[in-house]
Image (cartoon, rainbow, N blue to C red):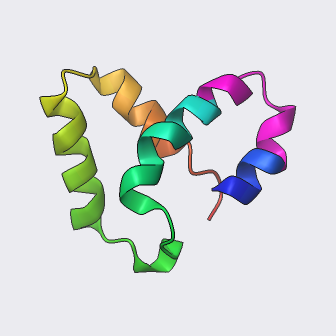
Amino acid sequence: MVMYLDGPSLEKRSHERDLYSLKRLAPLFAGREPASLTAADVRCYIAQRQTDGVSAATINKEVGCSGPL
């Protein structure tokens, strides 16, 4: 994700939004290889963000921020 933010994300209008998403994603996914992530990991993240009162649209943007893996 960090490589994505330092590369392709810089060209996007939503780069600042991507940085915000990383801030939210990092505590749960930092240091993990993308291949090690499971659907259960993502569902857990989504459930936690829903508990935090975050809208579905925001959660979708955060989860979709990972860029091409």
Instruction: Please report the bounds of the magenta region as a residue range.
Output: 7-17
- For the N terminus, the image quarter is bottom right
Residue 23: horizontal and vertical position, in percent? 51, 39
Count of numbered marks? 0
Residue 12: horizontal and vertical position, in percent? 79, 30
Give the prevailing secondary structure in the magenta stretch.
helix
Residue at horizontal 68%, vertical 55%? Answer: 2
Residue 56: horizontal and vertical position, in percent? 28, 26
In this view of the protein, which residue sits in the foreground, 17 or 69?
A: 17
Q: Residue 36, located in which quarter of the rendered image?
A: bottom left
Residue at horizontal 54%, vertical 42%? Answer: 22
Q: Residue 58, located in which quarter of the rendered image?
A: top left
Horizontal relation, residue 53 to residue 2: left or right: left
The answer to if 10 sits in the magenta stretch is: yes
Horizontal relation, residue 13 to residue 31: left or right: right
The answer to if 26 sits in the magenta stretch is: no
Residue 3: horizontal and vertical position, in percent? 75, 58
Residue at horizontal 56%, vertical 42%? Answer: 65
Residue at horizontal 37%, vertical 23%? Answer: 57
- Vertical side of 33 occupied by 40: above or below: above
- Vertical side of 55 occupied by 4: above or below: below
Q: Residue 18, located in which quarter of the rendered image?
A: top right
Horizontal relation, residue 9 to residue 53: left or right: right
In this view of the protein, which residue sits in the foreground, 23 or 3?
A: 23
- For the C terminus, the image quarter is bottom right
